[in-house]
Amino acid sequence: MLHGPLLYVVALVAAFVVAAVASPAGVSGAVLLLPFQVRVLGTPSPAVTPTNLLYNVVATPGAIYRYFKNGQRGGDLTRLLLIGTIPGVVVGSIVRVTLLPSPRAFDAVIAIVLIPLGASVLLSPVKPKEPRTPRVMSSAVVAVVSAVVGVVGGIYGIGGGSILAPLLVSSGRPVSEVAPATLTSTFLTSIAGVVTFAVLASSQRGSVAPDWGIGLVLGAGGLAGGYVGARMQPHLPELLIRRVLGVLVILIGIRYAWVAAG
């Protein structure tokens, strides 16, 4: 594992690259950084979860600002996601500390969810051959799904964008609406998660509080990378964004399946 100044340099660069690639699709990149933190940076469990949430808090405003500047705010979708994800992440944070010191079972669950979702986004055409009405999920379904995703995000510190973005895109919503909505939801939800973990740290033993140094350095790299990625998004074909998102989600799912089986 890395030590000293090199640790922070590697963390900064990795977060920049991950955020630049992920933010055009509405994903903060936290789900990619979770195994990187454990394997390369040596962040202990369960502190890796609030550290990842801290990354989201610092990193996502760059992309969100750029989307807002472009006139992309997510509209009602943002509010629907927040209704579910904020209470969900509080519950997930409590579950992570009190009930799930070992994440293997949820690694398997995440893999089961992400691999089919990624395949759906990867294989679905942007413009169907015959005009049809997109099967957009109802408001109630979006709120319920986002609550479930919020719980998972609280457990793993992934914000939920990596699950919500492909699910919403595959249901027929345009990337231009999904990206700012899921990133805004990730930002506000992660604040709730960090606060919850900070409160729990005062009454729990072990590494419960975030690693503030690593989290802030990762967040700084993600802040710059997210801004760059959001700036590029309007100039990228939606087909390319969907394909990149699909491949990323599948690879993440395979990674979690491998960890769960190990």
Image: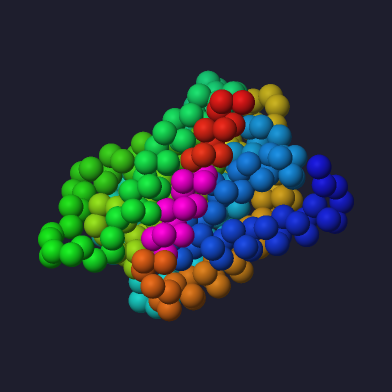
Give the quarter of the image for residue 75: bottom left
Whether residue 103 sits left or right of residue 240 in the image: it is right
Seen in the picture, residue 16 relative to 66 is either above or below; the reply is above
User: At x 78% / y 59%, what residue is drawn?
Assistant: 9
Q: Is residue 138 magenta?
A: no
Seen in the picture, residue 132 relative to 229 is either above or below; the reply is above
- How would you classify the magenta stretch by its main secondary structure? helix
Seen in the picture, residue 187 relative to 140 is either above or below; the reply is below
Q: Work out whether residue 102 or residue 184 is closer to the camera in this orientation and state it.
A: 102
Q: Is residue 244 magenta?
A: yes
> Residue 74's spot in the image, x, y percent?
33, 64
User: Would you say residue 28 is visible in this rendering?
Assistant: yes
| Quadrant where the image shows the N terminus | top right
> Residue 100's spot in the image, x, y percent?
54, 23
Q: Work out whether residue 234 or residue 142 is closer to the camera in this orientation and state it.
A: 234
User: Would you say residue 200 is visible in this rendering?
Assistant: no
Q: Work out whether residue 82 or residue 165 is closer to the camera in this orientation and state it.
A: 165
Magenta highlight range: 241-252
User: At x 36% / y 66%, what residue is drawn?
Assistant: 239
User: At x 48% / y 29%, what residue is drawn?
Assistant: 108
| Quadrant where the image shows the C terminus | top right
